[in-house]
Amino acid sequence: MRTRLRELRPSTVLATIAFIVVTAIVLLPIAIIVLTAFKPAAEVNAYPPSLLPDAWTLDNLKTVTSELPFARLVGNSFVFAGGVTIFALLFDSLAAYALARLDFTGRRVLLVVIIATLMIPFQATLIPLYQLVADLGWVNTYTGLIAPRAADAFGIFFLRQFFLALPRDIDQAARIDGAGEFRIFWSVLLPNAVPALLTLGLFTFVNNWNDLLWPLVFTTDTEMGTITSGLTQLTGPSGIVPHGVMMAGSLIAILPLVIAFLFIQRRFIENIATTGLK
C-alpha cells in the first residue's frame, strides 16, 4: 500500500480531488431534495436550516399523493416524454439519412434552414403554435402534446453528423445486393447508429419529462397535465409554497429518470465503447 501511494503522481491526486469536489457539488441539490422531502414542515422552515432531518416523516409524500392525481400525472409524463422520444428518433433519423447519404437538389439549403431554426427562441413560436393546436382541436390531448415535438432540428443535425462519419462503402455494398434506400436506412445505417440514437433518445426523454412550460400551455385540465405541471398546484394557504411537499413531489418525479438510466446505462456505455467496430 505504501509503495502504491508513493507511485501516485501529484496530477492524479489533484484530478481525483477535483473529481470528488465536482461530484459533491453536482449531487448536493439532489441530496437536499431527498432530505427535505422527509422533513416535517417545522424543520423545513426552521432557521438556521439543517441538512439532516431531526425527525423523519412521510407526511410530505402522503400530501402529494392525496392532493394530486399523481398516478395519472406520472402516466401522462411517460406518454408525453416517451411518445415524443419515439417519434423524434424516427423522423429525425429519416431526415438525417436523407441529408447525409442522398444527393438531391437543395440539400445544403435545406440543412441551413433547419439549423437556422435553432436560433429562433421557443417562446417566439409558442403563441402561433398554440393557435394551430387549438384550431385542430388538440388542446388537452396527447396528440397536441406530442405532435408539435415529433421532430427536432438539433436531433436531425446530430444524427446527420453521425451518419456522415459512417463509411459509404456499406451503402454501396447494400445497393449492389439489391437493397433499396429504406432497407439501407433500416437494416444497415440504424444498427450502426445505436450509440447516437441512445444518446439522443436519453436527452430527448429527459428534456420533455422535465419540461414545465409546454404542458402548462397545451393542457388546461389537471387530468391531462404532467408531473412537472402538476407540482405547480401544490400551494398552501395564501399561496405559500410548502417546500417539503414540493421536494417530495420532485423526488418522486426524478425517480423514473434514475431508474430508466440505471436500466440502459450498461447498454449505453457498451455501445459508446464499441462505436466504429461494427
Image: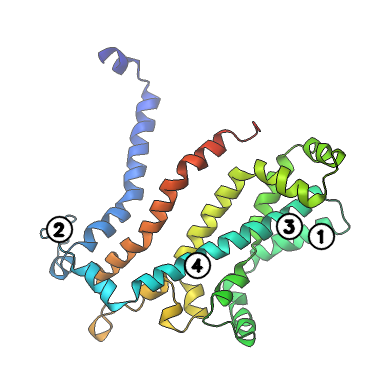
How busy is the neighbourhood of tag 2: few (under 14 within 10 Å), some, or many (20 plus)?
A: some
Q: Amino acid at mark 4?
A: Val
Q: How many marks?
A: 4
List the single residue furthest toward the left: 54
What colour scheme governs how the chains and residues are painted in the rendered image of this protein? Answer: rainbow
Give 161 or 22, whichever is nearer the viewer: 161
How many angstroms separate mark 4 from mark 1 (CA)? Answer: 35 Å
| Disc 3, SS | helix
Give 79 or 12, whichever is nearer the viewer: 79
Circle nearer the N terminus (3, 4): 4
Q: Amino acid at mark 3?
A: Ala
Q: Residue at x 62, y 61 (%)?
A: 88
Which circle marks residue 53 in the picture? 2
Vertical placement of residue 207 versus 28, above or below = below
Circle nearer the N terminus (4, 2): 2
How many angstroms separate mark 3 from mark 4 (CA)? Answer: 24 Å
**Horizontal relation, residue 39 to residue 22: left or right:** left
Circle nearer the N terminus (2, 3): 2
Q: State which mark lies toward you, 4 or 2.
A: 4
**Horizontal relation, residue 137 to residue 115: left or right:** left
**Quadrant location, the C terminus:** top right
Q: State which mark lies toward you, 4 or 1.
A: 4
Which circle marks residue 79 in the picture? 4
Q: Residue at x 49, y 75 (%)?
A: 215
Residue at image mark 3 = 95
Residue 59 in the image: x percent, y percent?
Answer: 18, 69
Vertical placement of residue 105 versus 21, above or below = below
